[in-house]
Amino acid sequence: MSRSVDEHVGEVAAAISRAAHRRTQDRPVERPVAPGLVGRLAAPAVSRLDVPGFDNSQMDGFAVHAADLARAADAPVALPTVAHVVAGDAAPAPLALGTVAPIMTGAPVPPGADAVVPVERTVAREFGPVGGGAVVEFTAPVAPGTFVRARGTDVRAGEAVLEAGAPLHPAAVGALVVAGVETVRVAPALRLAIVATGAELISGAVPDSNSRVLLAHAHELGLEATAHVVPDDPAELEALLDRLAPRTDVIVTTGGVSAGTREVVRQVLEPRPGAWFDHVAVQPGGPQGLAGWDDGDRVVPVVCLPGNPVSVLVSFELFLRPPLARAAGRIDQRPTGTGPLAEPLTSPSGRLQVRRGLLRSDGSVSLVGAAGSHLPVSYARADLLVLVPEDVTALDAGDIVQWWRIA
């Protein structure tokens, strides 16, 4: 029985979600906090430091005692400066009442000072000599705490910087570094095995781009992945699946899922309990399959894609990338938008047509290549997928289309 795109999206996502949940039950991995850290935390990461580590200035201005400026609304208050305080200085000396300290953004607030007045809110709008000795006039009072970034307002030592399950993206790495966290426990990454099928790949008559494309996508998401090629031989495919299943969480195959006489993936997997092979209402990428391979301890999901290279790329974007990205702690949805078509197109009734396109500087969308599934070079030249709904059979130049950003 054929499926809608949404139905197949849901089925694949559910299978990968189950595999990802099983994988999180495995022993966590200790990783150093460094660029390239990916995945999700297996346990809370506890701060070793207060962040910020000291009271510091939010502005270039003057550290003051707020009480000294209480009458500034009635008449200007003139106060002498002490030595400048800059970021990177050691702890400054306490600030005596009746004096102000020129202070730069990020510099430690002197003990005793309880507010910062921006330099542009003073009469002269300048700091004076570095060593102090200037006189600064203030024309307005200031509330205690103004423009002071208090110690520990982001996180306190002993508190969790990030909780278990948090994604490890670049901002997370930065937060862990400022909190003094050197290593974290990371949930083990989902393990993928990519299996490209076809005698033409073994012989070299057709280059095996499919496994390399999917391997590149897996690496981009920070997932562990291996790539394999088998001929149109059921026994060889079965043997490979037997070897892969114990050390793999998700298997992705390409080719061999349609209605021909040598559809090896379908021949091997369709008899399995719960397997599904049919068409999804999409072009390209209509023939799809979803099955499982039992290794004795668990059933490993096998997501079966068609063999044409553009069908593989489109199928990955529609069905595989979102749940794999979620498992990896990455953003699961591509940036989307709409724009007017730069040229007309036609589309088959009853199918979501996925065309390749370029976003022009004026916001319009031009098509790249034809609608065929055999044009990987055209796909690589595109930066958008253009989505034409199932109930639309033709669009004119100027009609609005939805797009996904892929580059």
Image: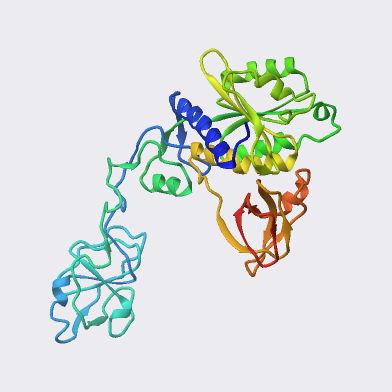
Counting labels gives 0
Where residue 103 sits: x, y (%)?
31, 69
Where residue 264 sits: x, y (%)?
74, 23
Where residue 154 sits: x, y (%)?
30, 52
As displayed, is residue 219 above or below residue 382?
above
As displayed, is residue 157 above or below residue 80?
above
Query: Can you see residue 304?
Result: no
As displayed, is residue 339 above or below residue 237?
below
Of 13 and 210, which appears nearest the observer? 13
Tell me the quarter of the picture where residue 59 sits: bottom left
Indicate left or right for 376 with 363 as reference. Answer: right
Indicate left or right for 248 with 129 as reference. Answer: right
Q: Residue furthest bottom?
A: 75
Where residue 3 sits: x, y (%)?
60, 36
Specify the quadrant that holds the N terminus: top right
Of 325 and 69, which appears nearest the observer? 325
Q: How are the residues colored?
A: rainbow
Of 334 and 138, which appears nearest the observer? 334
Q: Residue at x 84, y 31 (%)?
A: 204
Q: Residue at x 71, y 19 (%)?
A: 237
Query: Can you see residue 333?
Result: yes
Of 300 and 48, which appears nearest the observer? 300
As displayed, is residue 58 above or below residue 153?
below
Q: Residue furthest top?
A: 296
